[in-house]
Image (cartoon, helix red, strand yellow):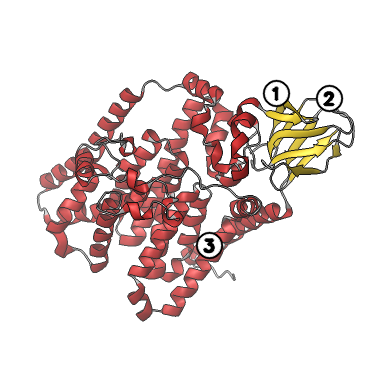
Amino acid sequence: MGGGSLSYISTFDFKSFGFPVGIFYPNLTLLPFALLKNILGSWYTSILIGVAFYTFISLILAHWVAYKFTNDRYQAIVTAILYAFGTYRIIDIWTRFALGEFIALTFLPLVVYGIYSITFGNYRDWPFLSYGLALTMLSHVLSTYINIWFCILVAVIGIMYVIHHQLKSRIVSLLKASILFLILSAVFIFPFIEQELTHIYSQPAPFKLSFFASLPSDVVWSMINNNYFGYYNWHKSEVFTVGIVGLVVITVFPFLYKSFSKKEKASYFLAIFLIILPTTLIPWSIFDSNVLVDVIQFPFRELGIATFIVAILGSKELKILMDNLTNSWEKTILLFATVCLVLLPWYSSLTTLKTSTGIMNDKVIERDMRSNAYGTLNLDNYTPRSGQSVLQNVSEKHLGMLNNKKYVFNDYVAQPNTIIYREKIKKGDQIVLPFYGMKNLEVMVNNKRQVISWTKTILVKFTANTNGKNVKVAFVPSNIDRFGAMLSLFGWVSFTGYILLKFYKRKFNVNVRI
C-alpha cells in the first residue's frame, strides 16, 4: 500500500523500473508484515511476529475446520497442532522462505473442508470453499491453481456419491462457491487479466518437473530424520517431505484400519498418493513440456495438502489409542510421547537449520535488499517476452534513449506506483524510457499528459509536447481495476456481514429477517 492506493508496480525496489510485481503476484496478505515494519522499524522482528501471527491464524482455522469434520474438540486441537507445526509448513517459511506459499497454507483447511462439504457433506457450507480459495488467491497464485486441481480430484473421486445424493443442490453450491470466489478475489484477478491480455508473457520460472522428482528412498529417509533442508533435489539425498509425524501416521494407520470410516480410509490413500506424487514413481518427464502441469514448477508443492490430511488422520489415531487405554498413566505416557514426536524433531530441525544458514538480523536483511541481486529477483517473470533482450540494461543501468541516442536515466525519485525522472526535457525531444509499457500508464511532462507508444522491445516512448524539468510515469488504475477492487470490497463486507447475521440469529434465536 502507498499513498492510499494498492501497490501495482514496484518503484522503491526491484531495480526501480516499474516492475509490475503487484499486478502479477498478490500482496494483500503481506500487509501485516508491512504494518509491523512501520510500527517497529525492524524487518527481522516484523517477519518473526508476522510468521507467528499467521501460525496463530493457522491454528485457529485448522481447529475450526477439524471440529467441523469430527465434531470432537480433542481431535480438533490435535489436528491444529499437527498442521501448524507440520514439517512442510516449516520448510515453506524457514527453508524456502516462500512467504506467499506459507501464508496460503494458512487458508488451506478452508479449501479442503469447502470442497469436502460440497461433494460429501453439508453442501450449505459452500462459502468455506469461496473464502479459502479467495484468501489463497490473494496470497499466492500457484497455490490457488494447485488447490483448484485438488478440488477437481476430490470431485472426481466423489462423483458417484454426488450423483446419488442431492446432485442438483451440490452442483448449485459449487457454482455459488465459484462465483463468490471470483467476486472476493476480483481485486487481484481483474488487473491481472487486463495486463495478461496486453502483452505476451513467458511462463514464470519454467522448470523441468522430472528434475525435481525425488527417489522414494530419499523421501523415506528425509521423513525419518525430519529433514528441513531439501536442496530442491539438487542431486542430494535430503528432500522435502511431510516429516517424521507424517511417517508415523501413515505407518500406524493400517494397524487401526478397522476403526476408520470409508471416507477416512479414502483420505488415507489420498494422503499416500500426495506423499509419493513428488517422487520418481510418477513419470514426471511426460509433463515437462505440458504447461498445464509444469507451471507448478516443483512437484512437492502439494505436500501442504498432504500435511493437513495427515494431521486429521493423526488426531483420529491418537484418539483411538487413548480410548483403548484404561490407565491414566498410560494415557499420560502416550500424550507425552506425542508431544515429543511433534515438538522435539521440530525444535531440533529448526536449530540445525538456524546453525547451517548463518546469522539473520536487520543488517543482513537490509544489505540483501540494497544489493537487490539481479539473479534472485526473477525479473524476467513479469517482463513482456519481446522486452527480455533489453531487460538487464533497463533494470541494471536504467538505459533508455534521448533523441535516438542511448541515455541513462539514473536521476529519479520513487513514489507509490510512480517514478519521476529528473531530466530537462525540451518540446520535440524523442524519448524512450527505461520503463516497460503496460495498460494504464500515464506519462506527464510539466503536468501535461504525453501521447505514448511502445518500442519493439515494449519500452515506453513519446515525443515531448512541452518543455519540462522532469518526466513523471505513473500507473493509474483503470475503471476495470477500480471496479474489481470495489466488487471485492462489497463482497467481503456484505457476505461476511450476511454470514455473521445468520450466525447471530441462530446462536441467540433472534428473529431477524435476512
The amino acid beneath tag 1 is: Asn
Q: Which residue is mark 1?
A: 410
Horizontally, residue 398 falls left or right of residue 28, namely: right
Residue 215 visible, this angle: yes
Horizontally, residue 314 falls left or right of residue 358, namely: left
- Residue nearest the viewer, comparing 458 with 127: 458
Where's the C terminus, which quadrant?
Answer: bottom right
Residue 209 to residue 420: above or below: below
- In three-dimensional space, the C-alpha distance between marks 1 and 2, rounded to whole angstroms, equals 13 Å
The amino acid beneath tag 2 is: Lys
- Residue nearest the viewer, comparing 12 with 126: 12
Residue 499 — which label? 3
The amino acid beneath tag 3 is: Ile
- Mark 2 vs mark 3, foreground winner is 2
In the rendering, at what x and y percent does residue 5 appear?
68, 42
Q: Which residue is mark 2?
A: 424
- In three-dimensional space, the C-alpha distance between marks 2 and 3, rounded to whole angstroms, equals 57 Å
Q: Indicate which disc, 1 or 3, sits on the residue closer to the N terminus.
A: 1
- In three-dimensional space, the C-alpha distance between marks 1 and 3, rounded to whole angstroms, equals 52 Å
In the rendering, at what x and y percent does residue 88 appear?
33, 43
Residue at the image position 62 percent from the left and 44 percent from the top:
386
In the rendering, at what x and y percent does residue 402 appear?
78, 29
Instruction: Identify the secondary structure beneath mark 2.
Output: loop
- Residue nearest the viewer, comparing 50 with 295: 295
Where's the N terminus, which quadrant?
Answer: top right
Q: Indicate which disc, 2 or 3, sits on the residue closer to the N terminus.
A: 2
In the rendering, at what x and y percent does residue 284 appear?
33, 52
Quarter holding residue 263: bottom left
